[in-house]
Amino acid sequence: MQTPEPRGGTRPTSRDVARAAGVSQATVSLVLGDKWRGRVSERTAALVRDAAGRLGYRPNLAARNLRLGRTRTALLVVPALTNEFFARVYTGAATVAARHGFGVVLYPSPEGVGPARDPFASARAALDGVIASSMAAEALDAIRGSDLPLVMLDSDPADPSAAARVNLDVADGMRQVTAHLLALGHRRFTHLASAVPSWTFDVRAAALADALRGVSVRTVRAPLDVHGAREAAERALTAPGPRPTALICDDDILAAGACKAVRRLGLRIPEDVSVTGFDDLALATAVEPELTTVRLPAERIGERGMEALLAVLEGRPAHSGDLPVTLVPRGSSGPPPAP
């Protein structure tokens, strides 16, 4: 049977949806407010959503939020807008948020070191909570000083200020890299380490040092840009003593700079020097040979971060446990050169 349209071209109401679906207005409110589970059946929820879609009904979020005392807006704080990883974190968070009628505002903290300008003086009343990704500890002082729930991604589990936390198993990622290179026969390494003070890079360094205990490893720090990484890698490759046969880089941007350094010195990848990255950005398959790296589930950590914030807001326990990461071997790693 054809569902009658609202008369006179007026905007459809929840009463119209209820009549079209053959349910009460209260049921419509439960379903479209995503609070129907355990209260109405899957079939009824599907009928309500179908009726709302056919009628073009959109709930009056402003009125509903006034009743709930919420703005249904989350703030995602990231170190930089230029890094593809954080764009993917935002995509994941925004996807989950949209399913629950929330919006996500993206806010960059300078270099992730900060401190960032306090966004809360004017925006405090317009936010329900904050998600912070891969931030240095001091960059979060303004956020900790607010009364908003804070979910931290890729951050120190010993920090007590977070209402919930979602981490990547970056230590295991570095263990996978070192196991791969050791199996190929490498015994002389340089760790091209990020100069940004951050928990995630500290964990990578500690895991690498533990995995390569008793093996020759030199650490060279570099800024998180291709130019600075190239200069640091050139210094490492031309330093006195035996040349390293593998450059282990804290992320793909540093690895791209390392690849440039190898070529500038007239060396080959991987015949003379192997290079590995971390993150699996689009850059990893743009260089030649393609980069051996660790794939991080960036969108999934954004999804889990938003799910954790929603759980906190609803008084539910957030899902715990680190997200697994995966080594992706490609052409930039191979056996070391023969003695």
Image (tube, grey):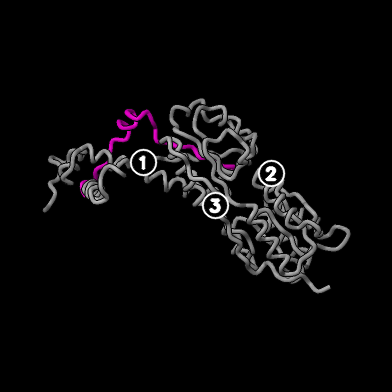
Secondary structure beneath dot 3 equals loop
Give me the C-alpha separation between circle 2 and circle 1: 36 Å
Q: Residue at x 74, y 60 (%)?
A: 247
**Residue at (52%, 49%) from the top-left corner?**
301
Label 3 sits on residue = 323
Is 107 in the magenta? no
Q: How many marks?
A: 3
Q: Callout 2: few (<14), some (14-19), or many (20+) C-alpha neighbours within 10 Å?
A: some
State the SS at label 2.
loop
* Residue at image coords 23%, 48%: 44
> Taking 93 as reference, is 1 left or right?
left
Residue 74 highlighted magenta (yes or no)? yes
Whole-percent x, y for residue 123 in the image: 47, 29
Q: Say which residue label 2 marks.
A: 196
Amino acid type indicated by mark 3: Leu
Q: Disc 2 vs disc 1: Cβ atoms closer than 8 Å? A: no
What is the secondary structure assignment of the residue under circle 1? loop
Callout in the foreground (3, 2)? 3
User: Of the residues shown, which amino acid type is indicated by label 1?
Assistant: Gly
Which residue is more in the foreground, 87 or 244? 244
The circle on residue 101 is: 1
Please tell me which residue lies in front, 67 or 322: 322
Residue 10 in sight = no
What whole-number distance in Å separates the C-alpha atoms at marks 1 and 3? 26 Å
Give the number of the mark in front: 1 or 3: 3
